[in-house]
Image (cartoon, helix red, strand yellow):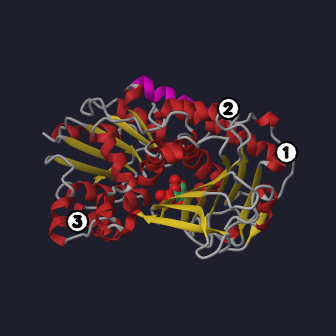
Amino acid sequence: MNKLTLTIFGGTGDLTYRKLLPAMYNLYIKNQLPKEFLITPIGRRDYTDTDYQGVIEPWISEFAQVKVKDEQLQAFFEHIHYFRMDFTTQSQYQLLDQYYEAHPSENHVVYYAVAPDFFEGITDGVSTMENMHEPKIVLEKPFGASFELAKFLSKKLETLFGSNHIYRIDHYLGKEMVRNILTIRDANLLFKNVWNKDSIDHVQISALEEVGVETRGNYYDHAGALKDMVQNHLLQIMSIVAVDDPTGNMNEQQLAVLKQLRSVDKLKIQDTLLLGQYDGYRQELHVDPASTIETFAGLKLFIDNERWQGVPFYIRTGKKMARREIEVKITFKRQREDVDPNVLVIKIQPTEGVYLEFNIKTPGEDSITKAQMDFCQNCNLIFKLNTPEAYERMLHACMIGDNSWFTKWEMIEYSWEYIDALKQMYSDANLPVYTYPQGSVEPKELSQLYHKDFEQWN
Ligand code: BG6
């Protein structure tokens, strides 16, 4: 009897190759999987197990965090059985059911690593299977092809499998430094007591990527940066920075922050949102040659509560940028006109660390000068080895039934509606989607949003 099975719908997709299987391999090497476990990637292609192993080997070698050794990889392969099936055909679920009759398991995790159009069919199929007892269902965003469908599906999933068995994944919540935001704030009096509008001038959350849309034009040309990055990952980070009680229940705390975002009817859209598209995007594979979808989004948001009233939260994210970098930068208020403000930067990716700027006396002079402390977490080999990759952490949490870091539907609903409303206002106001050259850090027009608070966002 298997202690754990992981069934992956979308077993021949990019997410499976790049993230899920390397994460499972890490868990395997770190002895975090039970001895008897089975991974069943599902796909339409006619692969034997040997064919499939040949396909995934280079991906695991490239993307697993631990160094891949041939002997261990071969042992890991023993736990993977590719299952050929057309998951859009309901009758085929009987075959999958028979397969699981022959490979019973105590703990079923089912990953929907496919486009949301397929979610409902898979849900119907899985719910009819007798040998898939109380499965835990893991969903990737977008959680439905449209807001209405996502809402409908969410209800259906919760009714069929129970709300505690639905794991809506936002892999940013698995990133070490995202979680560290809470600790850095809570465990240091230095920050804890000044984490509010009286001491903080503004917050900048930046997620830049060097890559473009690669092979995902089909999906991306409908989603755009707002749906792909802001609605989920970046609002997650923002709400984590802003929670009232960093030791409280995160789902409740974060939801409370989202509900206090300044309501859209009080916003002037030209001061709130700016969209851009990288030069050459329209020539990408599977992209409409006349597409106006954004590959860059910049926002200036406010949280109307006692802690944050009047503090701008700037967010920017884009593809084909000068560098890969995710960080949260907190600029404190100047305590006097003639001294620079303190700055705290929480570096999330690719460098993990904390940077602090403060003022000292210039040695040998009476003037004041700026000093920096720069802690690099991933430069420490032990820390680095002990830091699980985001998917590894999230998959493991799901296996042990811990869904505290998975997103509840209400949060998704709220952020989805908020972002949709902003986008609608932007298009109603006929604001342009600015073209920016590949390799820049933002469209130059973005400074319209932030110039009152700082000169340049490097
Ligand atoms: C995904 C987005 O959710 O996150 C991608 O769909 C993006 O477009 C990716 O590239 C970024 O994740 P990470 O972990 O590389 O920062």
> Hey, what amino acid is under mark 2?
Asn
Residue underneath mark 2: 305
Residue underneath mark 1: 428
Image coordinates of residue 24 in percent, x first then y, are 28, 55
> Hey, what amino acid is under mark 3?
Thr
Image coordinates of residue 237 in percent, x first then y, are 55, 47
Is residue 80 something that shows in the picture? no
* Picture residue at 67% right of the left edge, 31% below the top: 306
* Picture residue at 38% right of the left edge, 35% below the top: 403
**How many other residues sit within 10 Å of disc 1, few (<14), some (14-19) or many (≥20)?**
few
Residue 81 vs 121, above or below: the answer is below
If you read the primary sequence from the N terminus, does the residue marked by circle 1 or circle 2 appear first? 2
In the image, which residues are magenta? 147-160
Q: Residues under labels 1 and 2: Cα distance? A: 29 Å
Q: Nearer the viewer, mark 1 or mark 3?
A: 1
Front residue of 34/286: it is: 34
Quadrant in which the N terminus is drawn: top left
Is residue 386 something that shows in the picture? yes
Q: Quadrant of residue 235?
A: top right
Q: Residues under labels 3 and 2: Cα distance? A: 58 Å
